Image: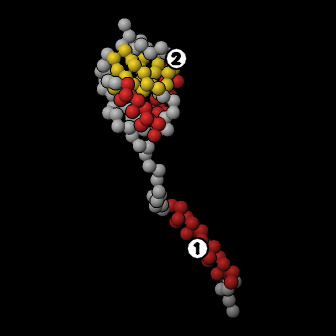
Amino acid sequence: MYDTRWPRPGPAMAAVAAVLGLVAGAILGLSSPGAAPSAQASAPPETTVAPTTTTLPEEFETVVLGSFNDRAGAEERLRLVRSQGVKDADLLDDQQWDLGTRWAVYSGIFKTEDEAEAHMQELSQLGITERFVKSVKQAD
């Protein structure tokens, strides 16, 4: 005769063992590091313009990516275009430059309008649609 203190062998014991095995497998599966994703999004293409220098020329052609009267709006646009791949984007302040608005987000420093136009076409490949070429001069 079987001792009643221990479960009797049979289908119920097999089912309990299977459930315990599934629970243990799930715990181990969740606690172990997974494999890296097989496909990752590629970075947006970068423009060919070198990053701006700290000293800008007195007069140059550029591509304006946004004009703003408040700095917060200009900085938000700057973050957006940089995240889209425009690494040389920066801000111009109308206290230093003749802009016609308080702040301008710009990309590129060029000697000619044709160079700026070519850069504007590169920016369209990054999905930047709000843009125009502008001549910029230092404020008096």
Instruction: Give the mark, 2 or 1, whose residue is nearer the N terminus.
Output: 1
Q: Percent from the top left, x then y, of residue 76?
A: 50, 28
Find residue 31 and name its label.
Answer: none
Q: Identify residue type, mark 1.
A: Gly
Label 1: element kind: helix
Nearest the camera: 84 or 19? 84
Q: Percent from the top left, x then y, of residue 16?
A: 65, 76
Nearest the camera: 130 or 94? 130
Q: Residue at x 44, y 15 (%)?
A: 99
Nearest the camera: 69 or 20? 69
Name, please, the residue furthest toward the bottom. Answer: 1
Q: Percent from the top left, x then y, of residue 62?
A: 39, 25
Left or right, residue 96 beside residue 71: left
Q: Identify residue type, mark 2.
A: Asn
* Location of the C terminus (image quadrant): top left
Residue identified by numbered label 2: 69
Residue 95 in the image: above or below residue 126: above
Residue 11 in the image: above or below residue 134: below
Q: Residue at x 48, y 28 (%)?
A: 131
Image quadrant of residue 108? top left
Q: Residue at x 47, y 19 (%)?
A: 103
Find residue 21 and name its label.
Answer: 1
| C-alpha gap between disc 2 and disc 1 | 65 Å
